[in-house]
Image (spheres, rainbow, N blue to C red):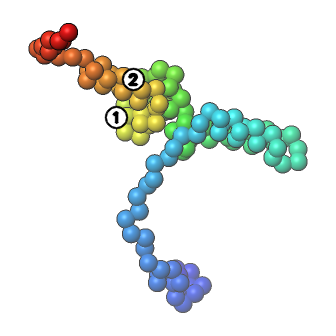
Amino acid sequence: MDRKWTSENPAASAAMPKNIQPTDKEPYTRNDVIKILAACDAIGHYGYERLRARAMVLLLRYTHRFRHTLATELLEAGGSLEDVAEVLGNSPNIIRKHYAKWSRLRQERISTLMRTVFDTPLIHEKKAPVNS
């Protein structure tokens, strides 16, 4: 429009999307990552192309969905929220908000903690006498 190549803007009549919400990105499983890296060995016609594909996948490991995968793996390995925040360059609150929910081990630790609290009989409860 600015360069006067057309007299009207065809995009002007398109409606803008409403209320676009980002979706959660599920991390890749370890098996998914293995399959993706294995697929790099089948790409292209030459070894150089396969090496480039593998290098790109390894680079992407630190971005986008791979970033979730890395964060989850670090948490699964016992890394703290602070450790993962330092690796990814985020705050611990961001790690908790976006990545911690995918950590199976973290969820199991929380479940165990909750079972410990709720499965423990209260001290003030008296057991009913058992009739023989």
Give me the disc on residue 78. none
Indicate the position of residue 76 as horizontal and vertical percent values: 50, 26
Residue at the spot x=43%, y=70% of the render? 17
Labels 1, 2: front one: 2
* 3D distance between C-alphas at marks 1 and 2: 19 Å
Q: Secondary structure at mark 1?
A: helix
Quadrant housing residue 28: top right
Question: Is the residue 58 above or below the residue 49 in the image?
Answer: above
* Dot 1 or dot 2, earlier in sequence: 1
Q: Secondary structure at mark 2?
A: helix
Q: Residue furthest top?
A: 132
Q: Residue furthest front?
A: 132
Quadrant housing residue 59: top right
Residue at the spot x=40%, y=58% of the render? 21
Q: Is residue 47 visible?
A: yes
Indicate the position of residue 121 as horizontal and vertical percent values: 21, 17
Residue at the spot x=55%, y=44% of the render? 65
Question: Is the residue 87 above or below the residue 39 in the image?
Answer: above
Q: Residues within 10 Å of mark 1 (few under 14, many from 20)?
A: few
**Mark 1 highlights which residue?**
93
Kind of residue at badge 1: Asn
Q: Residue furthest right?
A: 45
Q: Report the side of 61 relative to 101 (left or right).
A: right
Residue at the spot x=36%, y=26% of the render? 110
**Mark 2 highlights which residue?**
109
